[in-house]
Image: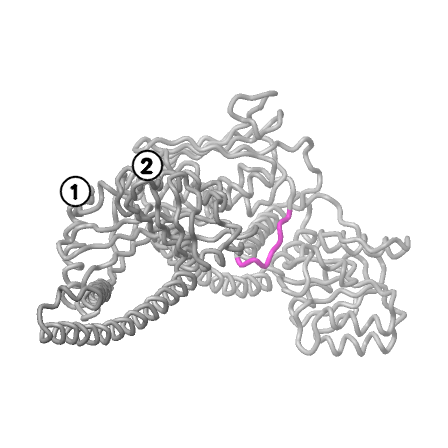
């Protein structure tokens, strides 16, 4: 542009000189000069005119290029991917591009001369004004991020602002580039949420997580690990196990395994125990390598968890397995004992039966009758022992009756003296005036044997004294220390030993099932639990007093019965009632059939006997109306007693039926009524009991009353 203007000025000067020469001839001194000067000027004029035209053409091209450049700039400015806004010092929009207008969904003309703050979210206004203040004070480029409004929606923007140099007479201006970063902000927020979720998960997962560098320093620890060490993030970062307070043994174990993971890149799993404020705790630690892109171990992550409960459960499971095995052994012994008891019953039947017959044959008060009476008493004690075996094998049922504790104590202590070594001195103090209690004799025997056995085990190594006493006591109302006992008279059984005693921390557990302090294989942990259950079932109570190395006292309280029972099967002087009815007697043991037939015939009954269930059924079918009662064994070949009863009832439904059995899983005293059996008698049969059962069943039949169970 400057060159064109200079050429144009020079051309105009030459042209004026030529015009002057043509008018002022005095200037020309000679024709040659006249001719030479105008021609020269004209030639120069022509040259300059050509140059001028060329420069004019160049000027036009430059102007066209400038206009094109201005058009391109305008298009770039308006349609740039970034919004551009020019503000004055008061924050008023002086100029903006279409991109910014589109961001706000507002016409460009409507944006001009409007405060930019009108379009900024109100919670971010302070960010915007601080941004302007920094820009005005520093005159340097400033950036910030905030939210702007688009109708009712918000979007995130990134502002990059520049201070425009102040022109003379003009106010300050700020040029801002506005970049929509909504998607990026959403992704960042989402990433932040994921990080927070990950952080919350890691901190609350229930595992102790620590990351180690190659120098075995902690570069990260989750909140659970920090809580365990009572440290903060700042205190734990960059510290070693030792400085975080880990035990020396654990530090050495972790160091060895972490170095192995760094060297080999292989995962390591270790277990260890740590003494903590809440006791000894067991942990599992898994060490996992973290690799760089090149495959080098960069860090190691240690993930540990408290497995104390699992370890305790495993120990308890193992103990239960041992106890289950012991229970299976006991069950097997019980089955064997049941079979032995069945055979013993069959042996006792003739002893008891013929003793009762002989007792009648000899004169009352004779030496022979007294001897037979003693044989009978011994046989009845044997019967009780068989019953205990059956109870042990779970083939007998609880029978509550008046019991004299003195006799059971004496019998149990005789058994103890033969089985306990002489290093233990057994002392007794049994009050013969102590009244009877309502209980099962076998269970009382179990109480005594369990308590005495526990006392023996506590003195097994060093010996000592075992003192057993029985006396009657009375509990008054509101007794101190006996809140579970009602006021009244009680039999107090004391079992005192001078053994090891019981620690205070386990006193509350001694009645728990399977709890035992004995070595494996020397106890099931059921003894005291069973004793406690029996005593509480009789509405009694049990108290244990013990101190370590000072022995143990066990006090058992059992309620005294209010009235003395008159039904005592051992009273052989009581008369036995007989009858004249016709009875069909069935048992597969010929000796038992013969004995029971003789017993019943002596009582006046007419007895038809059979040693087989099939023969008995045929005899009944031959003449069903001649029989008043059927007495049958339970376990027989071909047909059981229940099956025989069913077959007979098909012929005659009103015939009463009594079952005699040593033991059976199919019938017992409780369910016999449900099976339409009118009477149930346990073997070995006592004549007095059988006679009473017969009269009760026949009386019920005569009165048409509902069948009742009498034993």
Q: How many marks?
A: 2
Res 144 visible: yes
The percent position of residue 219, horizontal first and vertical second, equals 22, 51
Picture residue at 53% right of the left edge, 56% below the top: 105
Camera-nearest residue between 563 and 50 = 50
216 vs 637, left or right, is: left
**144 sits to left or right of 469:** left
Q: Nearer the viewer, residue 513 or 466?
A: 513
Point out the tag, 1 or 2, that comes first from the N-terminus.
Answer: 1
Q: Nearer the viewer, residue 541 or 705?
A: 541
Residue 697 versus residue 416 in the image, above or below = below
Image depth: mark 1 or mark 2 in front: 1
Neighbourhood count class around disc 1 (C-alpha, 10 Å): few under 14, some 14–19, many 20 upward: few
Residue carrying label 1: 243
| Res. 496 mark | none
What is the spatial separation of the Cα atoms under label 1 and label 2, in whole angstroms? 49 Å
The disc at residue 499 is 2
Pinpoint residue 319: horizontal percent, then vertical percent: 38, 55
Q: Is residue 320 magenta?
A: no
Q: Nearer the viewer, residue 570 or 263?
A: 263
Q: Quadrant of residue 637?
A: bottom right
Q: Is residue 395 magenta?
A: yes
Q: How is the image coloured?
A: one colour
Q: The residue tagged with tag 1: helix, strand or loop?
A: loop
Instruction: Give the overall secondary structure of the magenta segment.
Output: loop
Question: Which residue is painted at 22% across and 44% down in the image?
Answer: 236
| Residue 503 image position (x, y, % from top left) | 34, 35
Decide: few, some or many residues near mark 2? Use Cα within 10 Å; few <14, some 14-19, many ≥20.
Answer: many
Q: Which residues are magenta?
A: 393-399
Label 2 SS: loop
User: On the rendered image, what quadrant is the N terminus found in?
Assistant: bottom left
């Amino acid at each position: 542009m400057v060159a064109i203007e200079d050429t144009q000025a020079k051309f105009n000067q030459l042209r004026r000189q030529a015009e002057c020469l043509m008018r002022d001839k005095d200037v020309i001194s000679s024709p040659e000069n006249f001719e030479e000067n105008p021609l020269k000027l004209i030639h120069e004029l022509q040259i300059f005119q050509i140059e001028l035209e060329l420069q004019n053409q160049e000027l036009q091209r430059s102007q066209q290029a400038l206009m094109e450049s201005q058009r391109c700039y305008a298009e770039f400015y308006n349609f740039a991917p970034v919004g551009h806004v020019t503000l004055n010092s008061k924050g008023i929009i002086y100029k903006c591009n279409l991109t910014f207008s589109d961001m706000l969904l507002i016409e460009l003309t409507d944006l001009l001369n409007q405060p930019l703050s009108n379009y900024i979210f109100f919670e971010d206004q302070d960010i915007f004004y601080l941004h302007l203040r920094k820009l005005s004070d520093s005159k340097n480029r400033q950036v910030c991020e905030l939210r702007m409004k688009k109708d009712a929606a918000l979007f995130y923007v990134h502002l990059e602002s520049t201070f425009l140099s102040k022109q003379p007479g003009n106010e300050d201006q700020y040029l801002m580039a506005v970049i929509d970063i909504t998607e990026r902000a959403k992704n960042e927020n989402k990433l932040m949420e994921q990080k927070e979720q990950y952080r919350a998960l890691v901190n609350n997962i229930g595992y102790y997580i620590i990351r180690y560098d190659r120098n075995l320093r902690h570069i990260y620890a989750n909140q659970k690990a920090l809580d365990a060490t009572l440290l903060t993030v700042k205190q734990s970062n960059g510290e070693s196990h030792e400085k975080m307070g880990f035990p020396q043994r654990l530090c050495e174990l972790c160091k060895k395994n972490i170095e192995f993971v760094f060297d080999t890149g292989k995962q390591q799993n270790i277990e260890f125990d740590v003494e903590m404020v809440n006791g000894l705790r067991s942990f599992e630690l898994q060490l996992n390598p973290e690799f760089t892109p090149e495959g080098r171990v960069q860090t190691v992550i240690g993930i540990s968890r408290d497995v104390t409960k699992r370890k305790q459960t495993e120990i308890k499971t193992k103990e239960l397995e041992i106890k289950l095995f012991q229970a299976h052994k006991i069950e097997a012994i019980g089955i064997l004992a049941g079979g032995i008891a069945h055979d013993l019953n069959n042996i006792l039947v003739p002893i008891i039966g013929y003793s009762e017959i002989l007792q009648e044959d000899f004169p009352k008060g004779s030496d022979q009758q007294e001897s037979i009476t003693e044989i009978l008493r011994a046989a009845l004690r044997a019967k009780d022992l068989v019953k205990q075996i059956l109870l042990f094998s779970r083939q007998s049922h609880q029978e509550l009756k008046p019991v004299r504790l003195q006799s059971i104590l004496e019998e149990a202590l005789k058994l103890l003296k033969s089985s306990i070594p002489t290093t233990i001195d057994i002392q007794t103090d049994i009050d013969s005036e102590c009244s009877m209690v309502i209980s099962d004799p076998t269970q009382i025997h179990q109480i005594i044997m369990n308590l005495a056995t526990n006392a023996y085990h506590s003195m097994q190594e060093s010996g000592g004294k075992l003192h057993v006493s029985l006396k009657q006591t009375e509990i008054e109302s509101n007794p101190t220390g006996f809140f579970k006992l009602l006021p009244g008279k009680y039999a107090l059984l004391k079992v005192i030993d001078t053994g090891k005693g019981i620690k205070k921390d386990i006193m509350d557990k001694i009645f728990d099932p399977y709890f035992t302090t004995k070595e494996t294989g020397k106890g099931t942990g059921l003894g005291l639990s069973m004793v406690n259950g029996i005593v509480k079932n009789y509405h009694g109570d049990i108290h244990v007093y013990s101190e370590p190395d000072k022995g143990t006292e066990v006090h058992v309280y059992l309620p005294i019965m209010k009235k003395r029972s008159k039904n005592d099967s051992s009273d052989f002087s009581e008369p036995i009632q007989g009858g004249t009815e016709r009875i069909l007697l069935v048992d597969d043991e010929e000796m038992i059939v013969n004995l029971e037939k003789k017993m019943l015939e002596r009582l006046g009954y007419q007895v038809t006997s059979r040693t087989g269930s099939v023969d008995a059924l045929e005899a009944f079918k031959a003449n069903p109306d001649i029989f008043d009662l059927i007495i049958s064994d339970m376990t027989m070949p071909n047909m059981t007693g229940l099956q025989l009863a069913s077959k007979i009832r098909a012929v005659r439904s009103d015939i009463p039926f009594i079952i005699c059995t040593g033991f059976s899983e199919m019938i017992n005293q409780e369910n016999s009524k449900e099976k339409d059996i009118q009477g149930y008698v346990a073997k070995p049969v006592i004549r007095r009991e059988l006679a009473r059962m017969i009269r009760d069943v026949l009386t019920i039949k005569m009165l048409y009353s509902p069948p009742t169970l009498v034993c």
